Amino acid sequence: MNNVIEVKKLSKSFKVKVKEKGFIGSLKSIVKPKYKTIKAVNNISFNVEKGEIIAFIGPNGAGKSTTIKMLTGILYNDAGSISVMGIDPTKKRKKLAYEIGTVFGQKEQLWTHLTPYDNFKFFGAIYDIPEYVVEKKIKEFIEIFELSEFINTPVRNLSLGQRIRCEIVASLIHEPKILFLDEPTIGLDPVVKENIRTLIKRMNKEYKTTIFLTSHDVGDIEKLCKRVIIINKGEVVLDDSMENLKYHYLNKKIIEVKMKEKVNLDDSKGITILKDKGYNLKLEVDTKKTSISEALKKLDSDKIIDINISNVPLESIITNIYKGEK
Amino acid sequence: MLMEVKKELKFILLSIKYNLAREMTNKVTFLTNIIFMILNNAAFLIEWIIFFSIKDNIGGYGLKDVVLLWGLASGTYAICFLFFGAVQELPNLIMNGKIDSFLVQPKNVLISILTSKTKVSAIGDLIYSYILLFIYGFSIKNFLFFTLFIVTGGIIVTSIATIFGSLAFYITKADTLTGNVMGTMLNFDTYPEGIFKGAIRILFYTIIPISFAVYMPLNILKEFEIIKFIAVIIFTLFITLIAFLSFYKGLKKYSSGNLMSARV
């Protein structure tokens, strides 16, 4: 075991002002303000090993960003303990900054009026890296991450995909041991998303960087991560390997058939009719209750024109976990 | 410790360099900002020349004193906005949860925030302040003291704005309060000290300490007094410490945010 992140019983609440409707409500809130406490993160614990690519996912407002912000020293925790590379972010924020990199998909860290080259040099200086080392690093990045085309174009003139690529590269200038990526592919088209995923994979492979990723994009999770932590309402609801997640939750199969003749089929043990358009049928088979062959026996195999058997999409699995269904 | 200070100073200068590089992307705006600030300041001096043509002494100051007063005031604000140009935006950055990117850098958060912006017009203020020093009377001694006092003045103004700006960790609309305090300081410190009496004078040594930023330095330049000199230096250090303590105490209450934002 070689944990780079250790989180124990971590909690964080926010005090939010409650205001009644309208002008009277505004007056009341001045005279006697009311507050409510929102538990953003509630008693969560997990560890991350060196070199892992981990997906930290959950619906909006689940507490993902709050957790990342506590891990990176942006927010203070109310209770529990955090150790990132053996450092407590609340006590040694500056020391931790040398060890980690962050990319927030919704927040730019680069100076938009400067070129990526100037930005990288500025970031190098922030991390006290000698100029000749920064120059060498930039050359290396240009080659590995294919930046030569736009390295001298002001960031404001770059496409969103190019900008995110530069954001990620800038966060690598000090060779962080852990990279926190908060929705890095938000708003990107499928081709650019694929580029970013390749970049993340390469980073993990070339520099052995541990990746802590949050994303609403199932593609990111499926293609990059070997382990997934699902958080909902501030609590960890699942912490498992992607393999186990699929194994345990993929007991349901979808059968889509096109028949020569109309079939009359009703729900039965382990079989749910999802769609029945006479000649076209869509069934969900729970393989824990009935086998695929049993389900197929209910259909006349001579009359099948076409058949497709697939897994339930990961997106549906995750949605069900969010909803608390298993 | 000394190494840390050296690194922070190097970082401040680098930030200014990059800020200026950013501002220079539009050459016309860059130059006009500087020139118009000098002209704008000069217009006020013309008013004073007219006043002194009517009366020789206003609040114990002659024209030469007002020239020095304006020089110190312009220089003070030049240092504030040249080096710590984002101080006015501090409450907004706090309220809108936009200081995340500074918190993940291995540098002093407050210094990183304050130095993240430079007002180009401050260059105009700085040039103007030294022109006025030449008009007042140039000597090596005056030059050195003048430079020292616009630096201490700039730090005092920045510290006061930081203290009020840090209230944004606790209350909303702290931006208005900070704007008002800075505006008040700017308005008062371009008038002769002698025209203000009573309670206002107490304000000048407390909530809006322009006495330490401008009036005492002016008196020292006119006639050196060691007590006043020490008072200015000690007050500058004291108010800087209070500014850092206020910010870092408030930072524990920081609640970040998820607004889309860009660093421009």
Image (tube, coloured by chain):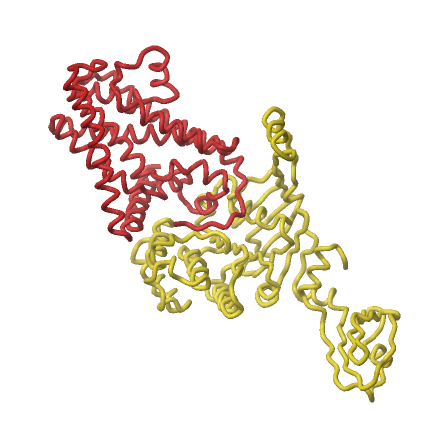
Total numbered labels: 0
The residue drawn where x is 47% and y is 31% is B174
The quadrant the C terminus of chain A occupies is bottom right
The yellow one among the chains is A
The residue drawn where x is 34% and y is 29% is B157
Percent coordinates x, y for residue B211 in the rendering = 30, 20
Judge left or right: residue B4 versus residue B68: right
Percent coordinates x, y for residue A52 in the rendering = 56, 60
Judge left or right: residue B237 versus residue A63: left
> Which color was chain B given?
red
Percent coordinates x, y for residue B220 in the rendering = 20, 20
Examine the rendered structure and indicate whether residue B227 appears above or below residue B87.
Answer: above
Residue farthest top in this picture: B198
Percent coordinates x, y for residue A191 in the rendering = 51, 70
Q: Is B134 or A38 nearer to us in this picture? A: B134
Judge left or right: residue B80 versus residue B102: left
Q: Quadrant of residue B107?
A: top left
The residue drawn where x is 65% and y is 36% is A37
Examine the rendered structure and indicate whether residue A56 appears above or below residue B37.
Answer: below
The quadrant the N terminus of chain A occupies is bottom right
